[in-house]
């Protein structure tokens, strides 16, 4: 059971480049989310989804796009990378059994130069 | 507008003693409160949760207390062990549409001193 898989683990981008961070889960979870972690800021929600075809914005959505065409996959697209997007990105998934919270991937460390 | 707050960025505790991590929230629509533990270079892992209809939940060395009137929760770790050294995040979520996303605090770095 792989859980939540994120790729790549590390990435360096030049300002203005675009890329997609991949996230896949094999637990048939309805809810999926993307967070970024920055020093002193905790984990901030970028986008989330409550099921295939349904997405919504979180706290810091600017500069990012998402889509949810299948239950398993929830890619995060950076449209035009900026140094302010240098961060560690975490994907997470959950069922509607609230007490168990979300299962997180191991993260993608992104540096924009 | 930070809905979940952890006002102590760091905490050091002697091995074997009690660690108490605190968390405050502002959104009365939250129904579940969770604690996550995070080691460097890893994703957060779920530790323990509590429903808003309870005031205490225990799991081994970990106990979470909820004071709804004060909008405050705390995590107690007894006895503290060196492996408990990590960053602890408090989080909250609701159950109705629009509130099911998980909102995190800024974290508290716990260091257990041998």
Image: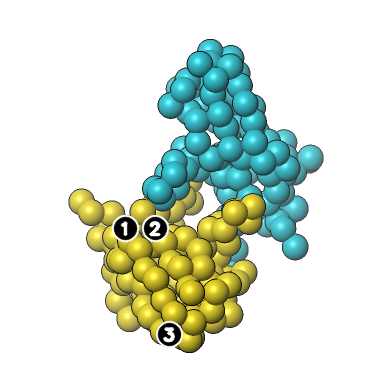
Chain colours: A yellow, B cyan
Separation of disc 1 and disc 3 at Cα?
26 Å
Q: Position of residue B54 (x, y in %)?
A: 61, 36
Which numbered marker is on residue A107? 2
Comparing B39 with B19, the one in front is B39
Q: Which of the two discs, 3 and 2, sits closer to the camera?
A: 3
Q: Are marks 3 and 2 in contact (CB under 8 Å)?
A: no
Q: Which residue is pictured at 49% across the width and 82% down the height?
A: A15
Which numbered marker is on residue A17? 3
Separation of disc 2 and disc 1 at Cα?
10 Å
Is B39 situated above or below A110? above
Comparing A5 with B50, the one in front is A5
Is B70 situated above or below B91? above
Q: Quadrant of residue A59?
A: bottom right
Q: Name the residue under label 1.
A: A4
Which element carries disc 2, helix, strand or loop? loop
Residue B101 at least partly seen? no
Circle nearer the N terminus (1, 3): 1
Circle nearer the N terminus (3, 2): 3
Which element carries disc 1, helix, strand or loop? strand
Q: Which residue is pictured at 48% across the width and 73% down the height?
A: A112
Is B30 situated above or below B23? below
């Amino acid at each position: 059971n792989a859980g939540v898989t994120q790729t790549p683990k590390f990435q360096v981008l030049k300002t203005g480049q675009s890329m997609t961070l991949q996230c896949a889960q094999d637990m048939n979870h309805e809810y999926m989310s993307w967070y970024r972690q920055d020093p002193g800021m905790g984990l901030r929600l970028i986008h989330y989804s409550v099921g295939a075809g349904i997405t919504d914005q979180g706290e810091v959505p600017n500069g990012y796009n998402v889509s949810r065409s299948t239950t398993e996959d929830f890619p995060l697209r950076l449209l035009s990378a900026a140094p302010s997007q240098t961060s560690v990105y975490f994907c997470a998934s959950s069922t509607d059994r609230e007490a168990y919270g979300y299962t997180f991937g191991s993260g993608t460390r992104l540096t924009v130069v | 507008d930070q809905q979940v707050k952890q006002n102590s960025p760091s905490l050091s505790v002697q091995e074997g003693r009690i660690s108490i991590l605190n968390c405050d929230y502002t959104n009365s629509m939250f129904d579940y409160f969770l604690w996550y533990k995070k080691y460097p270079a890893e994703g957060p892992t779920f530790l323990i949760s509590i429903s808003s209809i309870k005031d205490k939940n225990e799991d081994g060395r970990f106990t979470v207390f909820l004071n709804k009137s004060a909008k405050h929760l705390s995590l107690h770790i007894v006895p503290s062990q060196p492996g408990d050294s990590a960053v602890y995040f408090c989080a909250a979520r609701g159950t109705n549409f629009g509130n099911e996303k998980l909102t995190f605090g800024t974290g508290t770095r716990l260091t257990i001193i041998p």
